[in-house]
Image: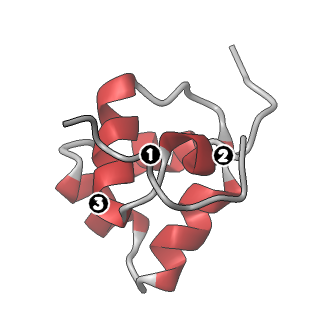
Amino acid sequence: MILVKVYPNIRNLREDRDLTQKQLASHLNTSQKTYSRYETGEHNIPTEILIELADYYSVSIDFLLGRTTQKDPYPKKK
């Protein structure tokens, strides 16, 4: 199934850090091809990958998915 959603924020964050898809895929323990499909929206991004990306970039998952322009993650509960 091909999804129509593209995730430009994920790509932009990666490029802002001068990372290749292969480098980030290695960090996430996945292949470059799979990671590329996350960026283009061809594959759904698993929850654990979204969490890892949000932590890695210190942004909210909503920002990664393009649901907000607010980068800051939500405050952690005490």
Percent position of residue 20, x then y: 40, 73
Sequence-wise, which precedes: disc 2 or disc 1? 2
Q: Nearer the viewer, mark 3 or mark 1?
A: 1
Q: Which mark is residue 56?
A: 3
Observer-nearest residue: 29 or 55? 55
At horizontal 29% and vertical 29% (from top left) the residue drawn is 48
Which residue occupies the extreme top position in the image? 1
Question: Which residue type carries mark 2?
Answer: Thr
Mark 3 and mark 1: Cα distance apart in space = 15 Å
Q: Which residue is mark 1?
A: 74
- Residue nearest the observer in this picture, 17 or 26: 17
Q: Secondary structure at mark 2?
A: helix
| Crowd class of label 1 (few under 14; some 14 to 19; many from 20; radius 10 Å) | few
Q: Nearer the viewer, mark 2 or mark 1?
A: 1
Residue that label 2 marks: 40
Colour scheme in use: secondary structure
In the displayed orientation, state which residue is furthest to the right.
4
The residue located at (38%, 78%) in the rendering is: 19
- In the figure, 58 relative to 1: above or below? below
- In the displayed structure image, the side of residue 41 where residue 76 appears, left or right: left
The quarter of the picture where the C terminus appears is top left
Dot 3, how many residues are within 10 Å of its Cα: few (below 14), some (14-19), or many (20+)? few
Can see residue 31?
no
Image quarter where the N terminus lies is top right
Q: Amino acid at mark 1?
A: Tyr
**Is 21 located above or below residue 33 in the figure?**
below
Mark-to-mark CA distance, 2 and 1: 26 Å
